[in-house]
Image (spheres, rainbow, N blue to C red):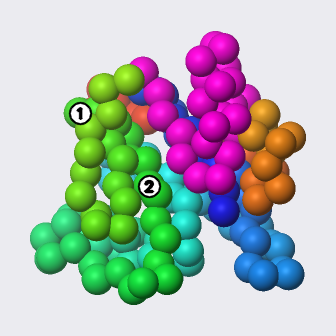
């Protein structure tokens, strides 16, 4: 799948995509307005979710199919939020969070003091579905 890790300042994610026997790279972390979004899951679900977010969440949440998978982290100036296939935001009150197939390794690294970038690098070492390089996007505040 992938690994996405975040704290209150930045979101990091690996670039590896595994599609059956094929592997390729793509950017899984991006800035959307004042938010930073990192997504793990199936390509179609991620595309539907990002289109909905880009549209300002004005329409009903996208309909996900039975094979769709989505775990997304959205960091905003207002806080850290996670989404699943239901596209309902759940606020994370902890200082950091990770999702995807390498989440446990990344969370362990975050608990040991690693920043999100290093946490994803550590997940790459132990999760075959996570691969580098790592993209990191920092939250911009209005005053910057």
Query: What label does residue 72 carry, if any?
Result: 2
Q: How many marks do you count on the picture?
A: 2
Indicate yes or no whether the magenta region holds residue 101: yes
Q: Residues within 10 Å of mark 1 (few under 14, many from 20)?
A: few
Q: Using the image, determine if residue 140 lies above or below residue 56.
A: above
- In the depicted view, which residue is nearer to us: 94 or 39? 94
Query: In this picture, is 55 found above or below 98?
Result: below
Residues in magenta, as a range: 95-120
The label on residue 78 is 1
Residue that appears at 46% across and 58% down = 71
Q: Position of residue 134 (x, y in %)?
A: 73, 46
Q: Is residue 118 magenta?
A: yes
- Residue at the location (79% across, 49% down)? 127
Which is nearer the N-term, disc 1 or disc 2? 2
Position of residue 123 measured from the top left corner of the image (x, y, whole percent): 75, 40
Distance CA(mark 1)–CA(mark 2): 16 Å
- Where residue 47 sits in the image (x, y, percent)? 46, 77
Q: Quadrant of the N terminus?
A: bottom right
The secondary element bearing badge 1 is classed as loop
17 in relation to 35, above or below = below
- The answer to whether residue 137 is seen in the rendering is no
């Amino acid at each position: 799948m992938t690994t996405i890790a975040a704290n209150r300042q930045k979101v990091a994610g690996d670039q590896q995509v595994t599609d059956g026997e094929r592997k390729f790279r793509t950017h899984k972390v991006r800035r959307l307005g004042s938010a930073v979004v990192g997504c793990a899951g199936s390509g179609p679900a991620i595309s539907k979710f990002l289109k909905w977010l880009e549209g300002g969440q004005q329409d009903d949440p996208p309909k996900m199919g039975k094979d769709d998978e989505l775990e997304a982290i959205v960091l905003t100036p207002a806080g850290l939020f996670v989404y699943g296939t239901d596209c309902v935001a759940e606020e994370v009150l902890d200082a950091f969070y990770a999702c995807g197939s390498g989440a446990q390794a990344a969370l362990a690294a975050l608990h040991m003091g690693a920043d999100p970038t290093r946490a994803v690098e550590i997940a790459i070492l132990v999760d075959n579905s996570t691969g580098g390089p790592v993209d990191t996007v920092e939250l911009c505040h209005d005053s910057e």
